Image (cartoon, rainbow, N blue to C red):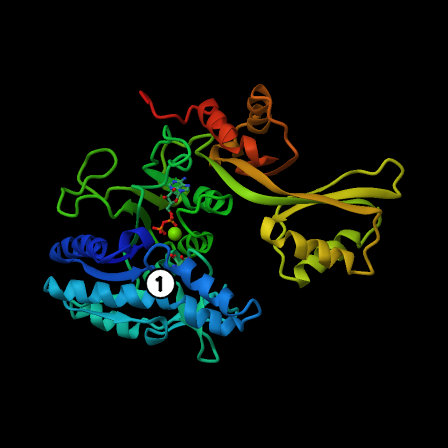
Amino acid sequence: MARIVVKFGGTSVANVERIRQAARHVKREVEAGNEVAVVVSAMSGKTNELVGWVNEASKFHDAREYDAVVGSGEQVTAGLMAIVLSEMGIQSRSFAGWQVPIHTDDAHGAARITGIDPTMLDERLRQGWVPVITGFQGISPHQRITTLGRGGSDTSAVAVAAAVGADRCEIYTDVDGVYTTDPRIVPKAQRLSKISFEEMLEMASLGAKVLMIRSVELAMAHKVRLVVRSSFDDPEAPQLAPDGTPGIPGTLVCDEDEIMEKQIVSGVTLAKSEAKITLRDVKDKPGVAADIFGALADRSIVVDMIVQNVSDDGSVTDITFTVPDGEYEKAVDALENNKNIEYAKIVGSKGGAKISVVGVGMRSHAGVASSMFRALADKGINIQLITTSEIKTSVLIDDQYAELAVRALHTYYGLDKKNA
Ligand code: ADP
Ligand code: ASP
Ligand code: MG
């Protein structure tokens, strides 16, 4: 017997029929003697609709009311899932974030979970009930509803799994695992049977939205075994692991030590809508970078790639960095209106694409970055910015070459599915 937390994403609960299909996966696990807690997202498209309504009501809305509205989609699916499970003869009830409770800080719209009281869930699980918990939402220290940021139900699921000491957390979605790159962009992408937490963390941060970054961080910190699998599979079919033996279908996200054969490059990711900003002729002296990025941090703007050139004579230099397209105007405004920052001019553009290659094998293999640049050059793709870490290399390129670059690198590193 195992204790499992299963999470269903938006497409897996898109309508009552899909909820019924998801519930059959739950039923299978319950009938196998497992204790199961369910975490649900809102129906696909619902959260976007709710965000749209809030913006229509007022551009300058109170963030607490945004959360009250936007977190409501999950309440609908939690209730419906509990109803469907009960109808199948499984004892079930829904829990909103505040009822568990799932405590968060008060950063409305992007709250962090600070603690989950497992008492009530634990009791229900022991009694053979299936608690159905709203993903994405929690309660602040001021007793207000909070939401965790887009895609946050993954994080709710992992946090619940850690709190109730689950043996594993299964993320049911519309693809049957984590692929070498987004299978919707590269049909030749291959499913990975296992991926390390670190690689998954990089892939999620670099644009693979199959798991929210924070959920991977939490799983890594609390050693939660995480499985990504499809809710579209036949719930009653024999459960086979990727190698065809009896087991759990999908991709296991686990410690690096559990992976025997380490790839040099495990995946390629794409993140669009990256804006590039260059400050020309800033003073080349201590404290300048701190002032620039301090001004951006004060406006809560997340900066990604940063490049500072060496100045010829030590007097002035150029600094270039990227921010999400949506933050471009805010970033320019923050810099233009900060009297401490001196520069000749600001130039920038929206609509860049960041392409990254990720793999733990890069630690022990030289030359991945240079071969990546060569592969892109062979396709005539110009690189605008480069950043690296121990297990990834990223480049910023023109948006119009994004898909071409992903496909070229995927082939170059031998990741294409055989016979495809
Ligand atoms: P859910 O609604 O279930 O949370 P998401 O849309 O958030 O689902 O995430 C699943 C999607 O992630 C897939 O449909 C796929 O297009 C996308 N995706 C991006 N990169 C990858 C990858 N490397 N492997 C699998 N899926 C990926
Ligand atoms: N419904 C929320 C969103 O669309 C949370 C989630 O699906 O994970 O962002
Ligand atoms: Mg998601």
Is residue 370 found left or right of 231 in the rendered image? right
Which is nearer the eye, 375 or 118? 375
Above or below: residue 287 compared with residue 249: below
Q: Residues within 10 Å of mark 1 (few under 14, many from 20)?
A: many
Above or below: residue 245 compared with residue 213: above
Is residue 335 found left or right of 36 in the rendered image? right
Give the image location of residue 250, x and y in percent: 28, 42
Which is nearer the eye, 179 or 262? 179
Picture residue at 14% right of the left edge, 53% below the top: 28
Find residue 187 and report its image quarter: top left
Q: Does any atom of ligand 2 lie closer than 8 Å to the CB of label 1?
A: yes
Report helix, strand or loop for mark 1. loop
Picture residue at 48% right of the left edge, 73% below the top: 65
Q: How many marks?
A: 1
Q: Residue most toward the front?
A: 56
Q: Amino acid at mark 1?
A: Gly
Which is nearer the eye, 151 or 394? 151
Q: Quadrant of the C terminus?
A: top left
Q: Visible in this render: residue 152?
A: no
Give the image location of residue 175, x and y in percent: 31, 42
Above or below: residue 83 compared with residue 272: below
Give the image location of residue 14, x and y in percent: 28, 54
Q: Residue most toward the bottom?
A: 142
Picture residue at 48% right of the left edge, 32% below the top: 361
Q: Quadrant of the N terminus?
A: bottom left
Which is nearer the eye, 49 or 14? 49
Is residue 219 found left or right of 379 in the rendered image? left
Find residue 88 and report its image quarter: bottom left
Q: Visible in this render: residue 289?
A: yes
Residue matched to label 1: 135
Is residue 280 found left or right of 178 in the rendered image? right
